[in-house]
């Protein structure tokens, strides 16, 4: 029989081999280690020896145990980069002209040879692509006639029923008839803007703001009034109130849950105050909730729509960031503007494609969506953490990074002498796509030393090398 001394030495040998793999980089922070039974077979030792080895590694701070999940390589604690300060845009309403620069970013996003750190599109391997494909194939046989017909507004009833059921989680109690399906959230936002504003009107938005929002404002001949925003809490309500006291605003457009690009999440009390502030002035709120399901905390943030008693909130969303970007299935709950939005939807695109709506409706009904979301959120959270660590290691001293609690985006403030547009160009030459800060504002020269980085792709040596290269390029631009 093996002595206690021999057994002790054996578990230390097992622990040492794992430690060597961690030191060499074979096992990286966040990687899952073999199960106790797997490692027992692999090392030809008893289960108790493996358990002792893992306990020993935990005591050294190299391994952590996650309940009902297993053992993982513990992330090495290193100082996090500081956060950007509250944005301070000019207080004037401006016409928008960002489309030319945005087009350059889009072109890079379509090149599969480029490492995608710019476009906020989830990687196919993180999505239930095969399951949805099977649903589409089955539906095309079962409902062949229905599949080729127009699905007139308000859109697929089965899908609207499923979205209505999910609205309970948002703090709402909406019914199927409260929704209109759209071609993605971008159409939902566009139709909402058309429903509440006319050419020349001013729309109050967060700053920085998603460039797609700016493009919609630009195409409709509207003006953008940028409101200071906190990197964690979103739009500054005091600044918004002061702006509303000075000028007429046709609507406020906000992304309270994990805004793009900041990743900020407006506290619930702020959402309540925002709705009350706008209700008092009879100003509609266009709420873009496209990232609402991608929260990392224990529960989903309640929407602003949950506090709307007058139908002034037009709530927009889609499944592009969680299920299938290419299906282009979105929706809007337009409140008192429902009839207007429905007419605009018909005039704009007539209908939303039928089969993708039905496939997503079936997926939601099966319960698969919630299981998928739990896995997707874990991946995105880990990818954000790893990217932040890599930025801290490779980017110039003084770089600041946001700390989102959901979604997949990081807003990175570089030293003021680093030109984001030059960095964008040099990154493309190196085969890396990023989103330069100037496309997130209607004001020329705003955010000229900022970039947005997407963490939608699974972490890999290729992604890690790209982040390191990007940091080196940024350092080379220091003057």
Image: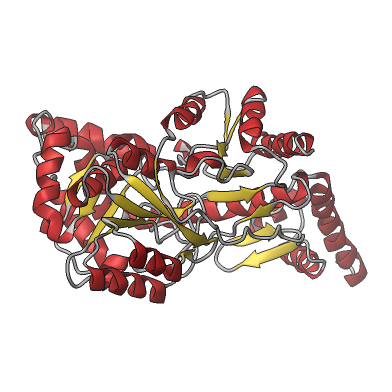
**Quadrant in the picture for the C terminus:** top right
From the top left corner, tell me how far across and down residue 32 is, in percent: 64, 53
In this view, the residue in front, 426 or 215, is 215
**Residue at x 8%, y 52% (from the top left corner):** 339
Q: Does residue 187 show up?
A: yes
Q: Does residue 159 show up?
A: no
How many circles with numbers are drawn on the protein? 0
Q: Is residue 419 left or right of residue 479?
A: left
From the top left corner, tell me how far across and down residue 177 is, in percent: 10, 57
**Can you say whether 153 is above or below 239 in the image?**
above
**Residue at x 51%, y 54% (from the top left corner):** 89
In this view, the residue in front, 158 or 242, is 242
Extreme-right residue of the structure: 5
From the top left corner, tell me how far across and down residue 16 is, in percent: 86, 56
Q: Is residue 30 left or right of residue 94?
A: right
In this view, the residue in front, 436 or 112, is 436
**Can you say whether 308 is above or below 351 in the image?**
below
**Can you say whether 131 is above or below 230 in the image?**
above
Quadrant in which residue 451 is drawn: top right
From the top left corner, tell me how far across and down residue 439 is, in percent: 49, 39
């Amino acid at each position: 029989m093996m002595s206690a001394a021999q057994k002790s030495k054996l578990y230390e040998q097992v622990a040492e081999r794992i430690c060597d793999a961690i030191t060499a980089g074979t096992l990286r922070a966040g990687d899952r280690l073999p199960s106790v039974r797997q490692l027992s077979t692999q090392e030809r030792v008893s289960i108790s020896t493996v358990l002792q080895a893992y306990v020993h590694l935990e005591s050294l701070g190299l391994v952590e145990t996650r309940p009902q999940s297993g053992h993982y390589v513990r992330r090495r604690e290193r100082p996090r980069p500081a956060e950007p300060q509250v944005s301070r845009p000019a207080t004037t309403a401006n016409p928008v002209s960002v489309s030319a620069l945005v087009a350059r970013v889009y072109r890079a996003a379509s090149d599969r040879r480029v490492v995608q750190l710019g476009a906020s599109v989830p990687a196919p391997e993180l999505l239930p692509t095969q399951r949805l494909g099977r649903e589409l194939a089955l539906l095309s046989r079962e409902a062949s006639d229905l599949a080729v017909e127009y699905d007139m507004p308000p859109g697929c009833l089965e899908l609207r029923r499923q979205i209505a059921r999910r609205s309970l989680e948002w703090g709402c109690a909406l019914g199927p008839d409260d929704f209109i399906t759209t071609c993605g959230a971008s159409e939902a936002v566009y139709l909402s803007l058309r429903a509440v504003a006319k050419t020349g009107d001013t729309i109050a938005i967060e700053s920085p703001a998603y460039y797609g929002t700016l493009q919609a404002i630009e195409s409709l001949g509207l003006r953008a009034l940028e409101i200071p925003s906190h990197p964690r809490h979103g739009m500054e309500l005091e600044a918004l109130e002061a702006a509303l006291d000075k000028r007429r605003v046709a609507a406020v457009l906000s992304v309270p849950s994990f805004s793009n690009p900041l990743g900020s999440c407006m506290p619930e009390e702020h959402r309540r105050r925002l709705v009350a502030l706008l209700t008092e002035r009879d100003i509609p709120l266009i709420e873009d909730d496209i990232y609402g399901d991608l929260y990392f905390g224990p529960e989903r943030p309640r929407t602003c729509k949950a506090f709307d008693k007058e139908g002034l909130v037009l709530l927009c969303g889609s499944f592009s960031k969680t299920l299938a970007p290419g299906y282009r299935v979105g929706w809007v709950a337009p409140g008192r503007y429902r009839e207007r939005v429905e007419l605009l939807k018909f005039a704009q695109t007539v209908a939303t494609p039928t089969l993708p709506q039905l496939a997503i409706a079936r997926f939601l009904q099966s319960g698969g969506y919630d299981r998928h979301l739990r896995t997707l959120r874990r991946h995105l959270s880990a990818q954000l953490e790893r990217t932040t660590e890599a930025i801290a290691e490779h980017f110039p001293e003084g770089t600041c990074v946001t700390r989102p609690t959901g979604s997949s985006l990081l807003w990175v403030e570089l030293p003021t002498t680093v030109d984001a547009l030059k960095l964008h160009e040099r990154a493309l030459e190196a085969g890396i796509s990023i989103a330069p800060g100037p496309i997130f504002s209607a004001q020329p020269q705003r955010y000229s030393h900022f970039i947005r980085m997407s963490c939608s792709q699974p972490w890999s040596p290729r992604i890690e090398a790209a982040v390191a290269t990007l940091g080196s390029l940024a350092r080379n631009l220091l003057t």
